[in-house]
Amino acid sequence: MQDLLALSAVEARAALDAKDISSVELTSAYIQAAEDTAGLNNYVLLAADKALDMASDADKRIAAGKTGVLEGLPIGVKDMFCTKGVTSTACSKILDGFVPVYESTVTANMWTQGGVMLGKLNCDEFAMGSANETSYAGPVVNPWDAGDGVDLVPGGSSGGSASSVAARSALLSVGTDTGGSIRQPASFCGIVGLKPTYGRCSRWGIVAFASSLDQAGPFSRDVADNALLLSAMASHDAKDSTSAETPLQDVVAAVGEGVKGMKIGIPREY
Protein backbone atom coordinates (compact mmCIF):
# COMPACT_ATOMS: atom_id res chain seq x y z
CA MET A 1 0.00 0.00 0.00
CA GLN A 2 1.29 3.45 -0.92
CA ASP A 3 2.51 5.54 2.01
CA LEU A 4 0.31 8.59 1.52
CA LEU A 5 2.20 10.60 4.13
CA ALA A 6 5.45 10.16 2.19
CA LEU A 7 4.13 12.04 -0.84
CA SER A 8 5.17 15.64 -1.35
CA ALA A 9 2.41 18.09 -2.26
CA VAL A 10 3.57 18.12 -5.88
CA GLU A 11 3.60 14.31 -5.96
CA ALA A 12 0.19 14.14 -4.28
CA ARG A 13 -1.32 16.51 -6.85
CA ALA A 14 -0.02 14.31 -9.67
CA ALA A 15 -1.35 11.17 -7.97
CA LEU A 16 -4.74 12.79 -7.45
CA ASP A 17 -5.02 13.83 -11.09
CA ALA A 18 -3.99 10.32 -12.18
CA LYS A 19 -6.73 8.88 -9.91
CA ASP A 20 -4.08 6.78 -8.13
CA ILE A 21 -5.34 8.17 -4.82
CA SER A 22 -8.35 10.17 -3.70
CA SER A 23 -8.42 13.32 -1.62
CA VAL A 24 -10.62 11.54 0.92
CA GLU A 25 -7.95 8.85 1.31
CA LEU A 26 -5.17 11.42 1.58
CA THR A 27 -7.09 13.60 4.02
CA SER A 28 -8.08 10.61 6.15
CA ALA A 29 -4.42 9.63 6.42
CA TYR A 30 -3.52 13.10 7.71
CA ILE A 31 -6.43 13.17 10.14
CA GLN A 32 -5.20 9.85 11.55
CA ALA A 33 -1.64 11.20 11.71
CA ALA A 34 -2.85 14.28 13.59
CA GLU A 35 -4.64 12.06 16.09
CA ASP A 36 -1.61 9.78 16.44
CA THR A 37 0.70 12.75 17.15
CA ALA A 38 -1.72 14.63 19.40
CA GLY A 39 0.95 14.69 22.11
CA LEU A 40 2.84 17.30 20.08
CA ASN A 41 -0.13 19.63 20.63
CA ASN A 42 0.04 21.00 17.08
CA TYR A 43 -3.69 21.41 16.60
CA VAL A 44 -6.04 23.51 18.70
CA LEU A 45 -8.89 22.29 16.51
CA LEU A 46 -8.92 19.28 14.19
CA ALA A 47 -11.82 19.88 11.78
CA ALA A 48 -12.12 16.27 10.63
CA ASP A 49 -15.72 16.37 9.38
CA LYS A 50 -15.21 19.62 7.47
CA ALA A 51 -11.95 18.32 6.02
CA LEU A 52 -13.58 15.14 4.73
CA ASP A 53 -16.46 17.13 3.22
CA MET A 54 -13.99 19.41 1.43
CA ALA A 55 -11.98 16.39 0.29
CA SER A 56 -15.09 14.74 -1.12
CA ASP A 57 -15.91 17.92 -3.05
CA ALA A 58 -12.34 18.00 -4.35
CA ASP A 59 -12.63 14.42 -5.60
CA LYS A 60 -15.78 15.38 -7.52
CA ARG A 61 -14.01 18.31 -9.16
CA ILE A 62 -11.04 16.10 -10.06
CA ALA A 63 -13.40 13.57 -11.64
CA ALA A 64 -14.93 16.41 -13.67
CA GLY A 65 -11.51 17.68 -14.73
CA LYS A 66 -11.95 20.98 -12.90
CA THR A 67 -8.93 21.28 -10.64
CA GLY A 68 -7.22 24.11 -8.81
CA VAL A 69 -3.58 24.54 -7.85
CA LEU A 70 -4.15 22.91 -4.45
CA GLU A 71 -6.97 20.56 -5.42
CA GLY A 72 -7.42 17.88 -2.78
CA LEU A 73 -4.38 18.77 -0.65
CA PRO A 74 -4.83 18.78 3.17
CA ILE A 75 -3.58 22.02 4.75
CA GLY A 76 -3.28 23.18 8.36
CA VAL A 77 -4.06 26.81 9.23
CA LYS A 78 -2.42 28.87 11.96
CA ASP A 79 -5.03 30.03 14.45
CA MET A 80 -4.32 33.67 13.53
CA PHE A 81 -6.44 33.38 10.36
CA CYS A 82 -10.19 33.95 10.50
CA THR A 83 -11.96 30.93 9.04
CA LYS A 84 -15.68 31.29 8.40
CA GLY A 85 -17.76 29.06 10.66
CA VAL A 86 -14.66 27.58 12.32
CA THR A 87 -13.46 28.74 15.74
CA SER A 88 -10.56 31.20 15.47
CA THR A 89 -8.95 32.31 18.72
CA ALA A 90 -5.36 33.45 18.04
CA CYS A 91 -4.66 30.88 20.79
CA SER A 92 -5.93 33.29 23.44
CA LYS A 93 -8.56 32.65 26.10
CA ILE A 94 -9.84 36.14 25.31
CA LEU A 95 -11.20 34.90 21.96
CA ASP A 96 -12.37 31.51 23.23
CA GLY A 97 -15.50 30.57 21.30
CA PHE A 98 -15.13 33.24 18.61
CA VAL A 99 -16.49 31.94 15.30
CA PRO A 100 -15.86 34.34 12.39
CA VAL A 101 -18.62 35.11 9.91
CA TYR A 102 -16.08 35.73 7.15
CA GLU A 103 -12.98 34.08 5.68
CA SER A 104 -9.51 35.61 5.51
CA THR A 105 -8.38 36.42 1.98
CA VAL A 106 -5.42 34.03 2.13
CA THR A 107 -7.46 31.03 3.27
CA ALA A 108 -10.27 31.92 0.86
CA ASN A 109 -7.71 31.85 -1.96
CA MET A 110 -6.54 28.40 -0.86
CA TRP A 111 -10.06 26.96 -0.71
CA THR A 112 -10.87 28.49 -4.11
CA GLN A 113 -7.86 26.58 -5.45
CA GLY A 114 -9.17 23.31 -4.00
CA GLY A 115 -7.26 23.13 -0.73
CA VAL A 116 -8.70 21.08 2.15
CA MET A 117 -8.67 22.58 5.65
CA LEU A 118 -7.46 20.06 8.23
CA GLY A 119 -7.90 22.38 11.19
CA LYS A 120 -6.46 25.27 13.20
CA LEU A 121 -2.85 25.09 14.36
CA ASN A 122 -1.40 26.10 17.70
CA CYS A 123 0.72 29.25 18.00
CA ASP A 124 1.94 31.72 20.58
CA GLU A 125 -0.92 33.82 21.98
CA PHE A 126 -1.67 36.60 19.47
CA ALA A 127 1.56 35.49 17.71
CA MET A 128 3.62 37.07 20.48
CA GLY A 129 6.42 34.61 21.18
CA SER A 130 9.30 32.68 19.69
CA ALA A 131 8.98 29.23 21.28
CA ASN A 132 5.23 28.51 21.12
CA GLU A 133 5.00 28.39 24.89
CA THR A 134 2.48 31.22 25.44
CA SER A 135 -0.60 29.60 23.84
CA TYR A 136 -3.63 29.14 26.08
CA ALA A 137 -3.82 25.63 24.59
CA GLY A 138 -0.38 24.83 25.98
CA PRO A 139 3.06 24.53 24.36
CA VAL A 140 3.79 22.83 21.05
CA VAL A 141 6.48 20.15 20.96
CA ASN A 142 9.07 19.85 18.19
CA PRO A 143 8.75 16.36 16.62
CA TRP A 144 12.55 16.02 16.46
CA ASP A 145 14.02 14.12 19.42
CA ALA A 146 17.43 15.03 20.82
CA GLY A 147 17.61 11.60 22.46
CA ASP A 148 17.88 12.90 26.02
CA GLY A 149 14.19 12.75 26.89
CA VAL A 150 13.82 16.53 26.89
CA ASP A 151 11.13 18.02 24.65
CA LEU A 152 12.41 20.57 22.16
CA VAL A 153 10.58 23.79 21.30
CA PRO A 154 9.43 24.17 17.68
CA GLY A 155 10.12 27.88 17.54
CA GLY A 156 7.42 30.48 17.24
CA SER A 157 5.11 32.01 16.90
CA SER A 158 3.99 29.60 14.15
CA GLY A 159 5.15 26.55 16.09
CA GLY A 160 2.14 24.39 15.29
CA SER A 161 2.43 25.18 11.60
CA ALA A 162 6.06 24.07 11.51
CA SER A 163 5.75 21.09 13.85
CA SER A 164 2.73 19.66 12.02
CA VAL A 165 4.50 19.65 8.65
CA ALA A 166 7.66 18.16 10.18
CA ALA A 167 5.59 15.50 11.97
CA ARG A 168 3.61 14.76 8.79
CA SER A 169 0.30 15.58 10.43
CA ALA A 170 -0.23 18.27 7.77
CA LEU A 171 0.91 18.08 4.17
CA LEU A 172 1.21 21.87 4.00
CA SER A 173 0.46 24.68 6.42
CA VAL A 174 0.21 28.44 6.56
CA GLY A 175 1.53 30.81 9.20
CA THR A 176 2.25 34.47 9.79
CA ASP A 177 5.57 36.24 10.20
CA THR A 178 6.18 39.61 11.85
CA GLY A 179 9.74 39.30 13.12
CA GLY A 180 10.65 35.71 12.28
CA SER A 181 7.51 33.72 13.13
CA ILE A 182 7.68 31.60 9.97
CA ARG A 183 11.41 31.53 9.33
CA GLN A 184 12.55 30.61 12.84
CA PRO A 185 10.16 27.67 13.48
CA ALA A 186 10.81 26.33 9.97
CA SER A 187 14.51 26.30 10.84
CA PHE A 188 13.91 24.70 14.25
CA CYS A 189 11.79 21.93 12.69
CA GLY A 190 13.94 21.32 9.62
CA ILE A 191 11.39 22.28 6.98
CA VAL A 192 10.88 25.11 4.46
CA GLY A 193 9.19 28.33 5.55
CA LEU A 194 8.97 31.60 3.65
CA LYS A 195 8.03 35.14 4.65
CA PRO A 196 6.97 36.59 1.29
CA THR A 197 7.64 40.19 0.33
CA TYR A 198 5.40 42.51 2.35
CA GLY A 199 2.13 43.04 0.51
CA ARG A 200 2.37 39.84 -1.52
CA CYS A 201 -0.28 38.05 0.58
CA SER A 202 -3.28 39.95 1.92
CA ARG A 203 -3.45 40.69 5.65
CA TRP A 204 -7.26 40.91 5.58
CA GLY A 205 -8.83 38.49 8.05
CA ILE A 206 -5.59 37.86 9.95
CA VAL A 207 -5.48 38.88 13.61
CA ALA A 208 -3.03 41.77 13.57
CA PHE A 209 0.19 41.91 15.58
CA ALA A 210 2.19 44.69 13.90
CA SER A 211 0.39 45.66 10.71
CA SER A 212 3.40 47.25 9.04
CA LEU A 213 5.35 43.98 9.36
CA ASP A 214 2.76 41.14 9.39
CA GLN A 215 2.77 38.81 6.40
CA ALA A 216 1.27 35.39 5.74
CA GLY A 217 3.46 32.66 4.32
CA PRO A 218 3.74 28.95 3.48
CA PHE A 219 5.30 25.97 5.29
CA SER A 220 6.25 22.80 3.41
CA ARG A 221 8.74 19.95 3.30
CA ASP A 222 10.53 21.21 0.20
CA VAL A 223 10.91 24.30 -1.98
CA ALA A 224 8.70 23.05 -4.82
CA ASP A 225 5.79 22.52 -2.42
CA ASN A 226 6.43 25.95 -0.90
CA ALA A 227 6.18 27.60 -4.31
CA LEU A 228 2.98 25.69 -5.07
CA LEU A 229 1.29 26.92 -1.88
CA LEU A 230 2.52 30.50 -2.29
CA SER A 231 1.14 30.62 -5.82
CA ALA A 232 -2.34 29.94 -4.41
CA MET A 233 -2.06 32.21 -1.36
CA ALA A 234 -0.86 35.37 -3.08
CA SER A 235 -3.21 37.88 -4.67
CA HIS A 236 -3.97 41.57 -4.88
CA ASP A 237 -6.70 42.46 -2.40
CA ALA A 238 -8.56 45.77 -2.42
CA LYS A 239 -9.48 45.15 1.23
CA ASP A 240 -5.80 45.48 2.21
CA SER A 241 -4.37 48.91 1.37
CA THR A 242 -0.82 47.52 1.47
CA SER A 243 -1.57 44.67 -0.94
CA ALA A 244 0.81 44.62 -3.91
CA GLU A 245 -0.73 45.12 -7.33
CA THR A 246 2.27 43.64 -9.15
CA PRO A 247 1.34 40.07 -10.16
CA LEU A 248 3.30 37.23 -8.59
CA GLN A 249 5.85 35.77 -10.99
CA ASP A 250 5.51 32.09 -11.85
CA VAL A 251 7.33 30.81 -8.77
CA VAL A 252 6.45 27.20 -9.53
CA ALA A 253 8.21 27.37 -12.90
CA ALA A 254 11.14 29.22 -11.33
CA VAL A 255 11.94 26.38 -8.92
CA GLY A 256 15.15 24.69 -10.02
CA GLU A 257 16.34 27.51 -12.27
CA GLY A 258 19.26 28.20 -9.94
CA VAL A 259 20.76 31.48 -8.80
CA LYS A 260 23.76 31.70 -11.15
CA GLY A 261 24.15 35.25 -12.39
CA MET A 262 21.71 36.64 -9.86
CA LYS A 263 22.78 39.89 -8.19
CA ILE A 264 21.94 40.30 -4.52
CA GLY A 265 21.94 43.78 -3.01
CA ILE A 266 23.75 44.21 0.31
CA PRO A 267 22.95 47.21 2.54
CA ARG A 268 26.02 49.43 2.84
CA GLU A 269 25.93 49.45 6.65
CA TYR A 270 26.63 45.73 6.67
Image (cartoon, grey):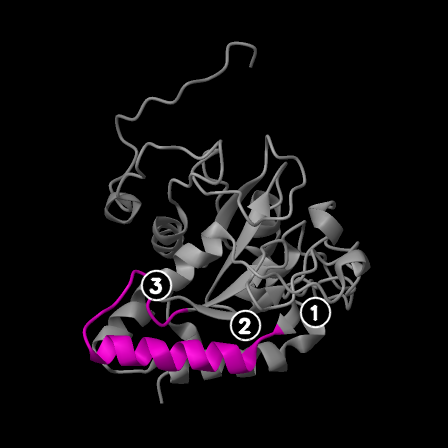
| Quarter of the picture holding the C terminus | top right
Q: Is residue 126 above or below residue 42?
A: above
* Amino acid on which disc 2 is placed: Ser
- Which residue, given by chain and number where applicable, does mark 2 sit on? 169
Residue 250 screen position, x and y as percent: 26, 43
Q: How many discs mark residues in the rendered view?
A: 3
* Amino acid on which disc 3 is placed: Leu
Q: Is residue 97 left or right of residue 207?
A: right
- Which residue, given by chain and number where applicable, does mark 3 sit on? 70
* Quadrant in which residue 228 is drawn: bottom left
Q: For the residue labelled by badge 1, is the local secondary structure a helix, a strand or a loop?
A: loop
Foreground pick, 149 / 96: 96
* Amino acid on which disc 1 is placed: Asn
Tell me which residue sits at (68%, 70%) in the image: 40
Q: Do we see residue 129 in this rendering?
A: yes
Q: CA distance from mark 3 to mark 2?
A: 17 Å
Q: Is residue 234 above or below residue 166?
A: above
* Quadrant in which residue 41 is drawn: bottom right
Range drawn in magenta: 46-73
Tell me which residue sits at (38%, 40%) in the image: 236
| Quarter of the picture holding the N terminus | bottom left
Number of the front mark, 3 or 2: 3
Q: Do we see residue 3 in this rendering?
A: no
Q: CA distance from mark 3 to mark 1?
A: 26 Å
Q: Is residue 24 above or below residue 67?
A: below
Marks 2/1 in contact by CB < 8 Å: the verdict is no
- Which residue, given by chain and number where applicable, does mark 1 sit on? 41
Q: For the residue labelled by badge 2, is the local secondary structure a helix, a strand or a loop?
A: loop
Q: Are there few (<14), some (14-19), or many (20+) residues within 10 Å of tag 3?
A: many
